[in-house]
Amino acid sequence: MPALLDEVCLLRGEVSTGYGRGSKKIGVPTANLKASDLAAKGTVEMRDRSGGARSGTLEALPRGVYVAWARLRGTVHPAVVNVGLSPTFEEAENPEPIAEAHLLDPIDADFYGEELALLLLGYVRPERKFPGFDELVAAIRADIDTAGRALTEPEFAAFRDDKALLADGAGADETVTLALTLALTLALAPALALAP
């Protein structure tokens, strides 16, 4: 089970068209936020457990799979997010880092051009090149299962209704600080209960 990151990462931007691999080749549809789009007209914000925030870039995040909450059309969904270049696709890697979010709740229609907010909370595994599609699909299915289980844990569930996901940045600082404080308290509660 992944641990809560020391710095959670808020990504907010417009969903761009991908390469059609997620849903067409793998059967796992994704909503894509490209690094260049986030830099030009989106948000990449790193928030530490004390409530401090700083700007970041998608390129600076460790490449790999993350547990996240996603907001689309005003509703928060559990998600698993790959940040990287999709190296398994031989000679067809992404030309820039992309956050590829798979929402665990079914979404009926395309949402290209709509705003998507992602709050990356836990690191599952590094991105890697798989020998074939069967191995890639098996790893993605395991990542989806891991994300679904992790997001039911109190330290992750505390972020589900976080206003940083619901707002367009206004008032997000205070809410994320409260959520981080609650998550830290929940994570430390067993140890504190044993203290004299």
Image (tube, rainbow, N blue to C red):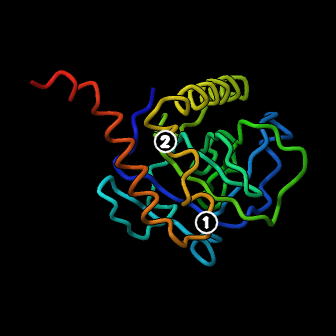
Mark closer to the chain start, 2 or 1: 2
Q: Which residue is mark 1?
A: 167
Horizontal side of residue 188 vs 19, given as left or right: left
Question: Looking at the rendered structure, which numbered label has been put on residue 116?
Answer: none
Q: Position of residue 123 (x, y in %)?
A: 46, 39
Please state which amino acid type lies under the numbered disc 2: Ala
Labels 2 & 1 near each other (Cβ < 8 A): no
Q: Answer above or below: position of 144 versus 7.
A: above
The secondary structure type at the circle numbered 1 is loop
Placement of the N terminus among the 4 image quadrants: top left
Residue 96 position, x and y percent, is 61, 61
Q: CA distance from mark 2 to mark 1?
A: 17 Å
Q: Secondary structure at mark 2?
A: loop
Q: Amino acid at mark 1?
A: Ala
Residue 158 as seen in the image, left or right of residue 37 = left
Q: Residue furthest bottom?
A: 40
Reading the image, the residue beneath label 2 is 158
Q: Quadrant of the C terminus?
A: top left
Q: Nearer the viewer, residue 158 or 52?
A: 158
Q: Residue at x 38, y 44 (%)?
A: 182
Give percent across and percent down for residue 14: 72, 66
Residue at 50% across, 65% down: 172
